[in-house]
Amino acid sequence: MSALIEPQQLSDETETVWLEDIEPLDYVRQSLDRLATRRGKPAYHRDGRMVGYAVLGPGARASPASGTFLRRVFWLLPHDRDGRPDGLYSCGAPSEAVDPRTIAPRTKGYKTQRSEGGPESDAMRELGITLPRT
């Protein structure tokens, strides 16, 4: 889950590679995957599709136990909003989802009004709470 990613886990990132245009995407899912390399397109073993990934710098150290590197991978499932606008996530977003426009190397990204699928609720407006707009 995005909320469980700690800033220090992203400290070796140098680049974010997008495999497709993120402009039409309200959100992407992000996860930390154990991968064999610091760079290059990782293998993808989920349903759906990989949308992007992080590249690590030469100073990134592999796990002593597994020899793997923790790298972020950005992905979408077939039932996500981009593929099914009126489906399960027509409003709201999965827990690991963030607005791709808020992602940068060493920055985990966050949910926005756009990634949550629409305007603030009446209750949020009454409390003066707004989601960031991008």
Image (cartoon, rainbow, N blue to C red):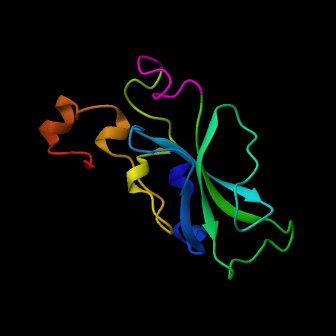
Question: Predominant secondary structure in magenta?
Answer: loop
Give the residue displayed 50% in from the left and 69% down from the top: 106
Q: Residue furthest bottom?
A: 59
Give the residue displayed 20% in from the left and 45% down from the top: 129
List x then y, in percent, for residue 81. 46, 27
Q: Image height check: is 67 above or below 96?
A: below
Q: Would you say 127 lies left or right of 24 here?
A: left
The magenta segment: 78-87
Give the residue displayed 40% in from the left and 47% down from the top: 99
Q: In the picture, residue 9 is in which quadrant?
A: bottom right
Is residue 85 a member of the stretch shown in magenta? yes
Give the residue displayed 55% in from the left and 67% down from the top: 15
Q: In the picture, residue 121 is in which quadrant?
A: top left
Q: Residue furthest top?
A: 86
List x then y, in percent, for residue 128. 14, 45
Which is nearer the eye, 11 or 45?
A: 45
Is residue 133 a member of the stretch shown in magenta? no
Number of numbered discs on residues: 0
List x then y, in percent, for residue 75. 59, 42
Q: Would you say 62 lies left or right of 131 here?
A: right
Q: Image height check: is 96 above or below 107?
A: above
Q: Would you say 13 lies left or right of 24 here?
A: right
List x then y, in percent, for residue 50. 63, 43
Q: Would you say 44 lies left or right of 3 here?
A: right
